[in-house]
Image (cartoon, helix red, strand yellow):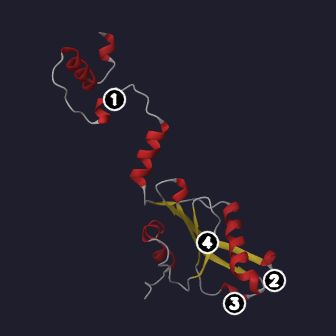
Protein backbone atom coordinates (compact mmCIF):
# COMPACT_ATOMS: atom_id res chain seq x y z
CA UNK A 1 0.00 0.00 0.00
CA UNK A 2 2.87 2.41 0.48
CA UNK A 3 3.17 2.97 -3.28
CA UNK A 4 -0.36 4.39 -3.33
CA UNK A 5 0.30 6.84 -0.53
CA UNK A 6 3.09 8.52 -2.48
CA UNK A 7 0.90 9.22 -5.50
CA UNK A 8 -1.78 11.85 -5.81
CA UNK A 9 -5.42 11.02 -5.22
CA UNK A 10 -6.22 11.52 -8.90
CA UNK A 11 -3.59 9.00 -9.98
CA UNK A 12 -4.80 6.45 -7.44
CA UNK A 13 -8.39 6.91 -8.63
CA UNK A 14 -7.36 6.39 -12.26
CA UNK A 15 -5.36 3.26 -11.36
CA UNK A 16 -8.18 1.73 -9.32
CA UNK A 17 -10.74 2.55 -12.02
CA UNK A 18 -8.60 0.86 -14.67
CA UNK A 19 -7.97 -2.23 -12.52
CA UNK A 20 -11.66 -2.74 -11.80
CA UNK A 21 -12.61 -2.22 -15.48
CA UNK A 22 -15.02 0.60 -14.89
CA UNK A 23 -15.67 3.01 -17.74
CA UNK A 24 -12.73 5.29 -18.46
CA UNK A 25 -12.92 8.82 -17.20
CA UNK A 26 -11.43 11.52 -19.36
CA UNK A 27 -9.01 13.59 -17.33
CA UNK A 28 -6.86 16.49 -18.45
CA UNK A 29 -3.31 15.39 -19.26
CA UNK A 30 -1.89 17.18 -16.22
CA UNK A 31 -4.33 15.44 -13.88
CA UNK A 32 -3.68 11.98 -15.39
CA UNK A 33 0.10 12.30 -15.01
CA UNK A 34 1.52 10.82 -11.80
CA UNK A 35 2.77 13.40 -9.35
CA UNK A 36 6.23 11.90 -9.51
CA UNK A 37 6.43 11.74 -13.32
CA UNK A 38 9.31 13.57 -14.93
CA UNK A 39 8.27 16.36 -17.28
CA UNK A 40 10.61 16.95 -20.17
CA UNK A 41 12.36 20.30 -20.53
CA UNK A 42 10.94 20.66 -24.03
CA UNK A 43 7.39 20.35 -22.68
CA UNK A 44 7.98 22.94 -19.97
CA UNK A 45 9.73 25.30 -22.40
CA UNK A 46 6.93 25.03 -24.95
CA UNK A 47 4.28 25.70 -22.32
CA UNK A 48 6.29 28.60 -20.90
CA UNK A 49 6.81 30.25 -24.29
CA UNK A 50 3.15 29.86 -25.22
CA UNK A 51 2.12 31.47 -21.96
CA UNK A 52 4.55 34.38 -22.30
CA UNK A 53 4.48 35.05 -26.07
CA UNK A 54 4.14 38.78 -26.69
CA UNK A 55 5.19 39.63 -23.13
CA UNK A 56 7.45 42.65 -22.61
CA UNK A 57 10.56 41.87 -20.59
CA UNK A 58 12.93 44.47 -19.18
CA UNK A 59 16.57 43.42 -19.59
CA UNK A 60 19.84 44.52 -18.02
CA UNK A 61 22.20 46.22 -20.48
CA UNK A 62 25.79 44.98 -20.45
CA UNK A 63 28.85 46.64 -21.97
CA UNK A 64 28.96 44.25 -24.93
CA UNK A 65 25.41 45.20 -25.95
CA UNK A 66 26.17 48.90 -25.38
CA UNK A 67 29.15 48.57 -27.75
CA UNK A 68 27.03 46.76 -30.33
CA UNK A 69 24.45 49.56 -30.21
CA UNK A 70 27.21 52.15 -30.73
CA UNK A 71 28.59 50.10 -33.64
CA UNK A 72 25.15 49.95 -35.27
CA UNK A 73 24.74 53.73 -34.88
CA UNK A 74 28.16 54.29 -36.43
CA UNK A 75 27.92 51.73 -39.25
CA UNK A 76 24.32 52.38 -40.27
CA UNK A 77 24.06 56.13 -39.84
CA UNK A 78 26.75 58.47 -38.62
CA UNK A 79 29.93 56.89 -40.03
CA UNK A 80 28.86 57.05 -43.66
CA UNK A 81 28.65 60.85 -43.43
CA UNK A 82 31.63 61.39 -41.12
CA UNK A 83 34.38 58.84 -41.84
CA UNK A 84 37.15 58.29 -39.31
CA UNK A 85 35.25 59.31 -36.18
CA UNK A 86 34.17 55.93 -34.70
CA UNK A 87 36.39 56.41 -31.65
CA UNK A 88 34.48 59.60 -30.79
CA UNK A 89 31.07 57.93 -30.50
CA UNK A 90 29.76 58.78 -27.04
CA UNK A 91 27.29 56.31 -25.64
CA UNK A 92 24.65 55.22 -25.85
CA UNK A 93 23.79 56.52 -22.40
CA UNK A 94 20.66 56.20 -20.28
CA UNK A 95 19.63 53.12 -22.25
CA UNK A 96 16.39 51.25 -21.75
CA UNK A 97 16.68 47.68 -23.05
CA UNK A 98 14.14 44.90 -23.33
CA UNK A 99 12.41 42.41 -25.53
CA UNK A 100 9.05 41.22 -26.69
CA UNK A 101 8.97 37.44 -26.43
CA UNK A 102 8.30 35.47 -29.58
CA UNK A 103 7.18 31.87 -29.98
CA UNK A 104 10.87 30.87 -29.93
CA UNK A 105 14.04 32.71 -28.87
CA UNK A 106 14.78 33.22 -32.59
CA UNK A 107 11.53 35.21 -32.82
CA UNK A 108 12.16 37.44 -29.78
CA UNK A 109 12.38 41.10 -30.75
CA UNK A 110 14.84 43.21 -28.76
CA UNK A 111 14.54 46.97 -28.42
CA UNK A 112 16.82 49.65 -26.99
CA UNK A 113 16.24 53.35 -26.53
CA UNK A 114 18.87 55.80 -25.35
CA UNK A 115 20.96 58.85 -26.06
CA UNK A 116 24.05 58.82 -28.25
CA UNK A 117 26.24 61.41 -29.93
CA UNK A 118 29.69 62.07 -31.27
CA UNK A 119 32.26 64.06 -29.28
CA UNK A 120 33.09 67.28 -31.08
CA UNK A 121 29.74 67.38 -32.91
CA UNK A 122 27.20 69.13 -30.65
CA UNK A 123 24.40 68.72 -33.19
CA UNK A 124 24.69 64.93 -32.86
CA UNK A 125 23.45 65.19 -29.25
CA UNK A 126 20.23 67.05 -29.93
CA UNK A 127 16.79 65.48 -29.91
CA UNK A 128 16.63 61.79 -29.07
CA UNK A 129 16.06 59.27 -27.80
CA UNK A 130 17.56 57.03 -30.44
CA UNK A 131 16.08 53.58 -31.11
CA UNK A 132 17.65 50.22 -31.99
CA UNK A 133 15.95 46.92 -32.79
CA UNK A 134 17.05 43.33 -33.38
CA UNK A 135 15.24 40.08 -34.04
CA UNK A 136 16.45 36.88 -32.40
CA UNK A 137 20.16 36.33 -32.92
CA UNK A 138 20.52 38.81 -35.79
CA UNK A 139 22.47 42.05 -35.47
CA UNK A 140 21.22 45.37 -34.18
CA UNK A 141 19.55 47.81 -36.57
CA UNK A 142 19.78 51.50 -35.79
CA UNK A 143 16.23 52.81 -36.31
CA UNK A 144 17.00 56.48 -35.85
CA UNK A 145 16.65 59.57 -33.75
CA UNK A 146 13.05 59.80 -32.66
CA UNK A 147 12.91 63.52 -31.94
CA UNK A 148 10.87 62.53 -28.87
CA UNK A 149 8.35 60.29 -30.66
CA UNK A 150 8.87 56.76 -29.36
CA UNK A 151 5.69 55.22 -30.81
CA UNK A 152 7.79 52.81 -32.89
CA UNK A 153 8.65 50.96 -29.65
CA UNK A 154 5.93 48.46 -28.69
CA UNK A 155 3.47 49.89 -26.19
CA UNK A 156 4.05 46.97 -23.80
CA UNK A 157 7.74 47.88 -23.45
CA UNK A 158 6.98 51.58 -23.06
CA UNK A 159 4.66 50.61 -20.20
CA UNK A 160 7.27 48.37 -18.53
CA UNK A 161 9.95 51.06 -18.89
CA UNK A 162 7.56 53.93 -18.02
CA UNK A 163 9.48 55.79 -20.70
CA UNK A 164 6.99 58.59 -21.32
CA UNK A 165 6.94 59.38 -17.61
CA UNK A 166 10.73 59.10 -17.09
CA UNK A 167 11.73 61.18 -20.12
CA UNK A 168 8.59 63.38 -20.09
CA UNK A 169 7.83 62.48 -23.71
CA UNK A 170 4.59 63.72 -25.25
CA UNK A 171 2.25 61.54 -27.29
CA UNK A 172 3.17 61.60 -30.96
CA UNK A 173 0.82 62.97 -33.50
Q: State left or right for residue 17 relative to residue 96.
A: left
Rendered view: 136 above or below 1: below
Find disc 1 in the rendering and name its residue: 33
Q: State left or right for residue 158 relative to residue 4.
A: right
Q: What element does badge 1 sit on?
A: loop
Q: How crowded is mark 1: few (under 14 residues within 10 Å), some or many (20 or more)?
A: some
* Separation (CA) of disc 2 from disc 4: 26 Å
Q: Do the residues labelled 1 and 4 touch (CB within 8 Å)?
A: no
Find disc 2 in the rendering and name its residue: 83
**Mark sitting on residue 89:** none
Farthest residue toward the top? 1
Q: Which of marks 1 and 4 is in front?
A: 1
Q: Nearer the viewer, mark 3 or mark 2?
A: 2
Q: How crowded is mark 4: few (under 14 residues within 10 Å), some or many (20 or more)?
A: few
In the rendered image, which quarter contains the C terminus? bottom left
Q: Where is residue 148 in the image (x, y as percent from the top left)?
A: 53, 84
Find disc 4 in the rendering and name its residue: 94
* Separation (CA) of disc 1 from disc 4: 49 Å
Q: State left or right for residue 4 relative to residue 26.
A: right
Mark closer to the chain start, 4 or 3: 4
Q: What element does badge 2 sit on?
A: loop
Q: Are marks 2 and 4 in contact (CB under 8 Å)?
A: no
Mark closer to the chain start, 2 or 1: 1
* Separation (CA) of disc 3 from disc 2: 17 Å
Q: Which of marks 2 and 4 is in front?
A: 2
Mark closer to the chain start, 3 or 2: 2
Amino acid sequence: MSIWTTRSAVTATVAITSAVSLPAVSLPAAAARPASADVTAAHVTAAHVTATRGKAVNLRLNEKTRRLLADAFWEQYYGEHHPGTRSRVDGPKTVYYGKIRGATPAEDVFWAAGFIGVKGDPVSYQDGPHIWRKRGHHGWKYRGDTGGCVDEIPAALLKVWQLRKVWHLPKCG
